Image (cartoon, helix red, strand yellow):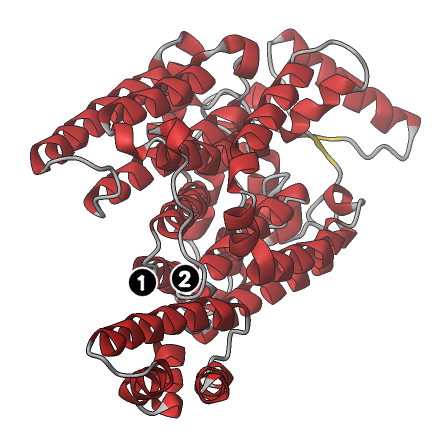
Amino acid sequence: MADYKKDFLDTVAEQIAYKPLRRVLGQELKEHIYDRTEEYEAQGISREEAERQAVRDMGDPVVIGTELNRVHQVQKAPSLAAITFLLLFMGFAGSAFMRWSPEQFANGYLYYIPGFLTLALMSWKGYPFLVRYLKWMLPLAGGLFLAGEWLCTQKMIPLWKIGYFRYFGILLLAPFLILLAYRLRRHGSKANLLIFAITGVCIFLPGFYKSYSRDLSACAVLAVGVTGTLLMMNHREIFTGSIGERKGIYGMILVGLIAVSSLFVCTDSRRELFWKFVNPDGSIRSVWDDTYNSALIRRLLSETPLIGGIDLTPQELMDYGTGAWYFEKRDPRQIGIYAVCNTEEEEKEFEAAAAKAREGGGIPRYIYFDESNVRLWDILPQHYHNNYWIALCILLFGWGAGAMFLGMIGGFYWLLFACIRKIRGNLAFSLSCCCGICLLMEGILYILGNFGYQYASFTNLPMISEGRISILIHMAMLGFVFSAYRYDRVVADPVQNTACS
């Protein structure tokens, strides 16, 4: 009879595509057969006949295995994968094309290669690895973050240079905090209070973040990512408790959002950054200001037709390149000065013009082009190759092409959150939702900047604007979403550690 039972279980296992799941499902079937066998034995049937009848009662092993495979199978997201690879290719091609720019001397487009590998590795093993080593991930991630922040505050060379990566440390803090919230989910309101307290400290402490505008844009992503995910976790009833307690958590999350939002305007410098965001025209002082870049982009976009790129005369290009279009009537001292000197007389004229501008308080740019060789690239903001991809698409090909570009980006996010919504596991959903919201928030800030409303420092547009190290971070976060969706039906949520109860 043992062979008969083994044949049944082997036949069922053959229908299960995900091999690691065969042992788990086989054990469950064994337990069912054992229980039915005991029932038959209690009725006075012999052991051998009882086992035979118990196996017969289970039904057709092929049908059972096929049904189990349908319910417990590795899921694929071909549409999301296709648009992801298309956007990655566009970002790679665009970055490779722009490598002639002085800003691209380091060949940042090459970062797409390890970025793609990171995406593939995380999609393949990300979520199963997290589940397997969950109890080690939380203290390890927290320790690495604190160590990185400590190194960022040091004056030693070259340790302080790690501060360049602080932006990404803040970005990765969001899934760390959500992992902590999941581990403490039985504490409901207290868990949310702790998460908002840590978020607020990370946004507020000047020792960590000083007043770097780059860090503030990352903090905005952190605040929205954490708040949005906590709301979705409560909506999914991941925080245990009564209906009344869950309603109270909604109120606490709203209060927490208001509290952390107030930290973005708690100092003069932060209020100034927020004012530049909502009213850039009221903060322009020179052609070097980001607010001037915002005004320039809005002006150029307003002159771009629906079909075909912007068409400017050499004189118009010069007016935009020098800043004369804006400062000629407002403050002529800020207008750019032609700095190409072929003779001694031209050099003296240049030095005199520069000295006069400086004495008057002006800080104009030095211009190395004239009407005979000025190009569109010369008049664009310095970091147009990375910060203004959407605006650049509109300027080169028209608003129609820009709308298609934005439609592709919107389609990516729609498909991304469609997959996240289908994830059933609480841990997989929580962390995937956090990663998705962070990627979405970065995209929103980037798009606003492309239409002339830049908050603090530019974020990177996931997959498209390479940003060097950002492509690795974005691909790791996106890869985790792929992995969580892929293994949602075959990898069970880990049981919460009783120490956190």
| Percent of width and height locating residue 116 | 66, 60
Number of other residues with Cα within 10 Å of mark 2, as a class: few under 14, some 14 to 19, many 20 or more:
many
- The kind of residue on which mark 1 rests is Lys
Q: Which residue appears at 11% of the width and 36% of the height? A: 242
Snapshot quadrant of residue 227: top left
Is 441 positioned to the left or the right of 249 in the image?
A: right
Q: Is residue 39 above or below residue 357?
A: below
Q: Nearer the viewer, residue 305 or 75?
A: 75
Find residue 488 and name its label.
2
Badge 1 element: helix
Q: Which residue appears at 31% of the width and 22% of the height? A: 261
Q: Nearer the viewer, residue 284 or 371?
A: 284
Is 70 positioned to the left or the right of 291 in the image?
A: left
| Percent of width and height locating residue 415 | 37, 65
Residue that numbered label 1 is attached to: 422
| Percent of width and height locating residue 352 | 76, 16
Find residue 23 and name its label.
none
Q: Which residue appears at 50% of the width and 20% of the height? A: 285
Nearer mark to the viewer, of 1 and 2: 2
Q: Is residue 294 above or below residue 433?
A: above
Q: Which residue appears at 53% of the width and 55% of the height? A: 128
Q: Nearer the viewer, residue 426 or 57?
A: 57
* Residue 73 in sight: yes
Q: Cα distance, mark 1 to mark 2?
A: 9 Å
Q: Is residue 280 above or below residue 121?
A: above
Mark 2 and mark 1 in contact (Cβ < 8 Å)? Answer: yes
Q: Is residue 4 above or below residue 454?
A: below
- Which residue is farthest left? 244
* Residue 325 in sight: no
Tell how many labels: 2
Snapshot quadrant of residue 320: top right
| Percent of width and height locating residue 319 | 56, 40
